[in-house]
Image: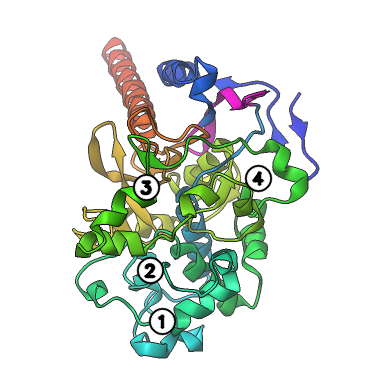
């Protein structure tokens, strides 16, 4: 029998493995054979129904990963935050092409009066910089302080030429706009716009004390070849591209994310804590014309607009690469290819979730083991799991088509 937590979310009593996705499950379980590999969860929805819900490994040195274990998933939260915004957009509470200052008058300061909601969702507001944004480093975790500082700041002029990834500020911008437009706290909006429509409470931006026993411990520290990320890029700060990337984070950020402080804050651009199950359900709705099970999350025209929106920029002045951002999500790498039909949001370290509306498929993966032996910033676990899942769906479709053809031939 499934268990029900106090908040109302049903936790499965056993894993779910649809026969069509056995190869996906096998690959996932192979990732967590040793305690040093940490743990993770994987969930897949097909045509609005769950077909894979599995977990493996260790949440910390002395605790196994369980059905209800969840992990801080970094930028995975950007896609979740964007989905809240799209719920408000489709009801006319927000207008994609309206200036942000329509809802947040102070935002017009320093030449930002023409920046729109679309610009924010497409990382073209020019407000990616956090280094030096607030005088007291502790205020980086204070939503009100960061929002006020961004409202007063001048935008990066490079925004007129390309997107500039708002690594830590995206969620603060979207959350403040949503709060101003509705007059409600963003965490309350997460409840009414995601938790209640989906029937799943595991969308957290700030985890209450009584839920923290479920959070997996992250490791190792973010870096490349064991060199801390802050240290790695500091010598190159005079290079414009590196300066843009360095300015988008602040000293101590990587250390802080491995501690407990992120769970006290509300920074939806990077401190979201989720189960794979919750993420797969949300993206399962996006992949299925807005419907998951018998629950409506978004209208078909909304999900269609998201899926068909072309990437806003072929180059990003923070990332130094083509990010293919579109309305709060990005085109996904599946296997080794950047695809047009699959989109979602990956997080630093490897967690993330994607939707493929053409296949009616969503795939979500969360883990506490950041990256691989070469670097902890990210790896190919989710892309390859997504590729296996897409292959399973296409194989099943081909089998069904062959069966239909054989039946037709027999009847004739």
Tell me the quarter of the picture where residue 316 sits: bottom left
Neighbourhood count class around disc 1 (C-alpha, 10 Å): few under 14, some 14–19, many 20 upward: some
**Inter-mark Cα distance, 2 to 4:** 34 Å
Neighbourhood count class around disc 3 (C-alpha, 10 Å): few under 14, some 14–19, many 20 upward: many
- Residue 409 visible to the viewer: yes
**Inter-mark Cα distance, 1 to 2:** 10 Å
Tags 1 and 2 touching, CB below 8 Å: yes
Neighbourhood count class around disc 2 (C-alpha, 10 Å): few under 14, some 14–19, many 20 upward: many
Q: Residue at x 71, y 43 (%)?
A: 212
> Which mark identifies residue 153?
1
Instruction: Report whether 78 appears left or right of 245.
Output: right
Q: Secondary structure at mark 2?
A: loop
Instruction: Give the residue furthest to the top.
Output: 410
**Inter-mark Cα distance, 1 to 4:** 37 Å
Q: Secondary structure at mark 3?
A: helix
- Judge whether residue 373 is colored magenta: no
Which one is earlier in the sequence, the residue at label 3 or at label 2?
Answer: 2
Q: Residue at x 33, y 79 (%)?
A: 155
Q: Residue at x 35, y 25 (%)?
A: 388
């Amino acid at each position: 029998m499934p268990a029900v937590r106090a908040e109302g979310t049903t936790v499965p009593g056993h894993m779910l493995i649809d026969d069509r996705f056995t190869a996906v499950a096998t690959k996932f379980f192979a990732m967590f054979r040793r305690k040093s590999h940490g743990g993770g969860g994987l969930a897949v929805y097909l045509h609005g129904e769950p077909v894979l819900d599995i977990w493996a490994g260790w949440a910390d040195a002395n605790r196994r990963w369980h059905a209800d274990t969840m992990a801080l998933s970094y930028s995975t939260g950007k896609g979740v935050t964007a989905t809240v915004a799209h719920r408000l957009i489709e009801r006319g509470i927000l207008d994609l092409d309206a200036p942000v200052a329509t809802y947040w008058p102070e935002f017009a300061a320093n030449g930002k009066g023409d920046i729109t909601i679309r610009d924010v969702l497409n990382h073209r507001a020019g407000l990616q910089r956090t280094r030096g944004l607030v005088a007291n480093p502790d205020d980086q975790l204070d939503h009100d302080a960061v929002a006020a500082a961004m409202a007063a700041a001048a935008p990066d002029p490079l925004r007129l030429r390309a997107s500039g990834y708002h690594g830590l500020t995206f969620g603060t911008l979207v959350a403040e706009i949503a709060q101003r437009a509705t007059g409600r706290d963003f965490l309350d909006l997460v409840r009414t716009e995601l938790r209640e429509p989906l029937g799943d409470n595991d969308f957290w931006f700030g985890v209450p004390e009584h839920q923290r026993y479920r959070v997996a411990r992250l490791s190792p520290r973010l870096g490349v070849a064991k060199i801390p990320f802050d240290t790695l890029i500091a010598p190159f700060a005079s290079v414009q591209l590196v300066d843009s990337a360095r300015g988008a984070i602040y000293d101590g950020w990587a250390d802080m994310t491995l501690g407990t402080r992120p769970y006290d804050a509300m920074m939806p651009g990077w401190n979201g804590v989720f189960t794979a199950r919750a993420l797969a359900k949300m993206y399962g709705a996006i992949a299925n014309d807005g419907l998951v099970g018998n629950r409506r999350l978004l209208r078909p025209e909304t999900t269609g607009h998201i899926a068909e929106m072309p990437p806003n920029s072929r180059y990003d002045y923070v990332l130094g690469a083509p990010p293919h951002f579109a309305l709060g999500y990005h085109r996904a790498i599946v296997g080794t290819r950047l695809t047009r039909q699959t989109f979602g949001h990956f997080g630093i370290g490897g967690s993330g979730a994607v939707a493929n509306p053409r296949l009616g498929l969503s795939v979500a993966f969360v883990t506490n083991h950041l990256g691989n032996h070469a670097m902890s910033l990210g790896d190919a676990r989710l892309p390859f799991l997504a590729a296996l899942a897409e292959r399973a769906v296409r194989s099943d479709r081909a089998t069904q088509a062959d069966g239909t053809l054989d039946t037709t031939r027999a009847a004739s």
